[in-house]
Image: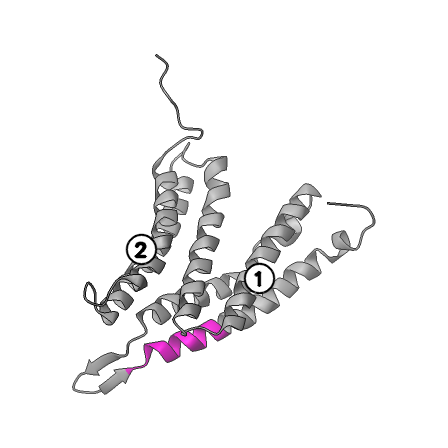
């Protein structure tokens, strides 16, 4: 009897990517648990830690795929950015539902990801993918965004009681400011991408 084989090659980076995708509903679902099972602060902490773990697997699977020969696959190259965008989009939707993120900011960030992904796919078909490679504005946007989201998931202030400083750190306010910075950089980086692709977009021809 023939053995069933997976439709793609499984390795450590691929498993980490699938694990990140599997954690997406958990980041959202944790907030639907009854308070009797987990306190509101416990939900915040758990969701924050799960998002951080998922973000760490993103860096780890990329490192492993580059470090070990044969671990970089086409399926992994496709799935990795998809997992990242799904994770960020799901977290933003959850934050909007918790009234911790403005819907307009979430729409700007998610809309940008959809637009840039579609632009890169189209430019690749035109043989000009190099014109829309990742720029520094996009990288800084990602850093601000990936710092803001876990802060907004945590939400609760952090108390400080030392000999020099006593008080609270307003994690929610810091996360909110970082997310605004990310939204501004999102708009500008999208403008940079569209400007780089302007010559291709304005050329005659094309179609659906």
Is residue 58 left or right of 113 when viewed as pictured? left
Q: Nearer the viewer, residue 141 or 149?
A: 149
Is residue 127 left or right of 153 when viewed as pictured? right
Find disc 1 in the rendering and name its residue. Answer: 111
Residue 54 vs 189, above or below: the answer is above
Is residue 22 left or right of 115 when viewed as pictured? left
In the rendered image, residue 197, in percent from the top left (x then y), is placed at 70, 55
In the rendered image, residue 95, in percent from the top left (x then y), is placed at 41, 68
Whether residue 136 is visible, yes or no, is no
User: Is residue 198 rendered magenta in the image?
Assistant: no
Find disc 2 in the rendering and name its residue. Answer: 53
Q: Residues within 10 Å of mark 2 (few under 14, many from 20)?
A: few
Q: Examine the image and state in which quarter residue 173 appears.
A: bottom left
Residue range in magenta is 169-180
Residue 97 vs 76, above or below: the answer is below
Q: Quadrant of the C terminus?
A: top right
Which residue sits at x=36%, y=59%? Answer: 28
């Amino acid at each position: 009897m023939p053995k069933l084989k997976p439709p793609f090659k499984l390795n450590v980076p691929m498993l980490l990517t699938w694990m990140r995708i599997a954690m997406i509903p958990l980041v959202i679902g944790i907030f639907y648990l009854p308070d009797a099972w987990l306190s509101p602060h416990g939900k915040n902490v758990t969701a924050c830690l799960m998002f951080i773990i998922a973000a760490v697997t993103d860096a780890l699977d990329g490192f492993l795929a580059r470090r070990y020969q044969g671990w970089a696959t086409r399926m992994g190259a496709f799935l990795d950015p998809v997992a990242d965008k799904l994770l960020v989009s799901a977290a933003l939707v959850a934050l909007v539902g918790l009234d911790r993120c403005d819907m307009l900011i979430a729409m700007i960030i998610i809309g940008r990801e959809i637009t840039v992904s579609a632009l890169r796919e189209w430019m690749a078909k035109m043989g000009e993918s190099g014109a829309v490679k990742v720029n520094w504005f996009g990288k800084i946007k990602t850093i601000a965004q990936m710092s803001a989201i876990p802060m907004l998931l945590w939400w609760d202030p952090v108390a400080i009681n030392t000999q020099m400083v006593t008080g609270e750190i307003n994690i929610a306010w810091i996360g909110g400011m970082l997310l605004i910075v990310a939204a501004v950089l999102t708009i500008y980086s999208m403008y940079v991408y569209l400007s780089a692709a302007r010559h291709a977009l304005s050329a005659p021809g094309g179609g659906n």
